[in-house]
Image (cartoon, rainbow, N blue to C red):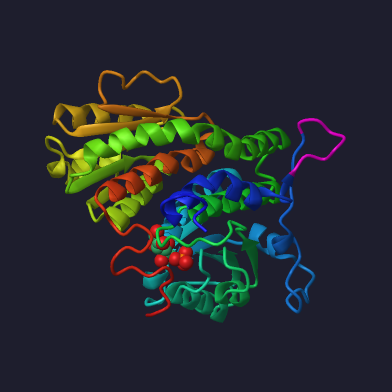
């Protein structure tokens, strides 16, 4: 069942190119007769569920007219929501907020009819996320589900949505569901950007072409990346603390890297927006502390990030940098540099999270941890 892999988690990491292709299949395509033209079709949003379309308005049209989007999720799915916020603001020009479902449901959030709540969940059974949906419905907001498990409670409870088609995720630590959530949310942001007239045809086409080629880029990269991350993992396997840092759309990537590491290796880890470390967390930076930095050149905050990497190194931290293919800016600064395939900024998290998943996996394996079933942790949290 593990397809020759030692753990489901590793199988699921390696399965990501295929899982992403499944998430894209039928939704993004090139009309036969027009070169360089791309279309996005999201069946679950363009047609309302039966009984819900009395006014003839599709969920997509309602989303396009929404005054704001509210993403509600937990854990890893909360991280993909944060990535989505950057993408929806930039590509669809719509205000977006991200909420921990468990925090949202216990306050009195101001929700109005023109809001759209987007619930993100692998299992579709997370109790807090389900409750957030019910609250949004009470206020007559539109509810959209982005869910992996077909027919799950969240899929049934929401007005419309998208399935991930990532296939079953068995490892407790989420990997392929995370990347497929990001793929689905990028598709949704692009489709909404078109609907709202925010994206020009040329820009839309270039994003679609780039998104469509991400699975192939990752597939070609995986073997070499695996060898590199094993070497880095050996070096860090005895750490007790680790810092992950990134800025902008890579801040959620840093949070996800930290969550994966603490989840399966039990090493304490924190994710920071790089500059924010100056406001307190910097006291944790000392000799031998692993600091994993995402520093992509397309990032508007790249120069700041580079400065922070230099600061970390000056404090004798053990610095790992994830950066672009061919970038030599860190050759004399970082202890290890991992080069990610090029793509557009908003798609870059899909690449950058892979080395972090592998790093956690190999570190946990070298520490002899119970990778597919970490202590105290359930695959789906249905209790409140
Ligand atoms: C992390 C992890 C959890 C889940 C969280 C939400 O690897 O698996 O943090 O992401 O419990 O679960 P879903 O997405 O099923 O709602």
345 and 341: which is toward the camera: 341
Residue 289 percent coordinates (x, y): 17, 39
Which residue sits furthest right?
33
Q: Let me know if residue 310 is in the magenta part.
A: no
| Residue drawn where x is 60% and y is 36% of the image | 216
Q: Let me know if residue 30 is in the magenta part.
A: yes
| Residue drawn where x is 31% and y is 56% of the image | 264
| Residue drawn where x is 84% and y is 33% of the image | 34
Up the image or down, 41 lies above or below 91; here it is below
- The answer to whether residue 264 is left or right of residue 235 is right
115 and 58: which is toward the camera: 58
- Determine the main secondary structure of the stretch shown in magenta: loop
Q: Is residue 114 visible?
A: no
| Residue drawn where x is 57% and y is 43% of the image | 17
264 and 52: which is toward the camera: 264
In the rendered structure, which segment of residues is drawn in magenta?
Answer: 29-36
């Amino acid at each position: 069942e593990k397809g020759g892999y030692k753990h489901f988690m590793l199988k699921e990491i390696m399965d990501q190119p295929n899982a992403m292709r499944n998430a894209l299949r039928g939704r993004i395509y090139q009309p036969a007769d027009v070169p360089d033209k791309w279309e996005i079709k999201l069946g679950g949003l363009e047609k309302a569920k039966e009984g819900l379309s009395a006014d003839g308005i599709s969920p997509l049209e309602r989303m396009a007219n929404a005054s704001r989007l509210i993403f509600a999720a937990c854990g890893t799915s909360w991280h993909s929501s944060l990535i989505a916020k950057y993408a929806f603001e930039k590509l669809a020009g719509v205000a977006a907020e991200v909420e921990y479902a468990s925090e949202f449901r216990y306050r009195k959030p101001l929700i109005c009819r023109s809001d759209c709540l987007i619930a993100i969940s692998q299992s579709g059974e997370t109790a807090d996320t389900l409750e957030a949906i019910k609250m949004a419905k009470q206020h007559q907001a539109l509810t959209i589900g982005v869910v992996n498990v077909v027919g799950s409670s969240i899929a049934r409870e929401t007005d419309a949505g998208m399935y991930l088609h990532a296939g079953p995720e068995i490892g407790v630590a989420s990997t392929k569901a995370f990347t497929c959530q990001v793929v689905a949310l990028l598709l949704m942001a692009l489709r909404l950007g078109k609907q709202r007239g925010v994206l020009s045809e040329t820009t839309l086409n270039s994003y679609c072409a780039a998104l469509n080629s991400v699975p192939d880029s990752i597939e070609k990269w995986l073997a070499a990346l695996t060898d590199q991350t094993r070497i880095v993992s050996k070096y860090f396997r005895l750490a007790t603390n680790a810092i992950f840092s990134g800025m902008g759309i890579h801040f959620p990537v840093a949070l996800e890297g930290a969550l994966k590491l603490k989840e399966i290796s039990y090493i304490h880890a924190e994710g920071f927006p790089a500059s924010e470390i100056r406001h307190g967390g910097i006291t944790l930076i000392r000799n031998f502390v692993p600091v994993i930095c995402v520093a992509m050149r397309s990032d508007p905050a790249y120069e700041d990030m580079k400065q922070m990497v230099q600061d970390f190194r000056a404090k004798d931290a053990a610095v790992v940098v994830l950066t672009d293919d061919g970038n030599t800016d860190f050759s004399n600064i970082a202890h290890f540099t991992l080069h990610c395939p090029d793509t557009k900024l908003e798609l870059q998290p899909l690449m950058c999270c892979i080395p972090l998943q592998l790093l956690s996996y190999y570190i946990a394996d070298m520490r002899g941890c119970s990778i597919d079933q970490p202590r105290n942790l359930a695959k789906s949290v249905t209790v409140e």
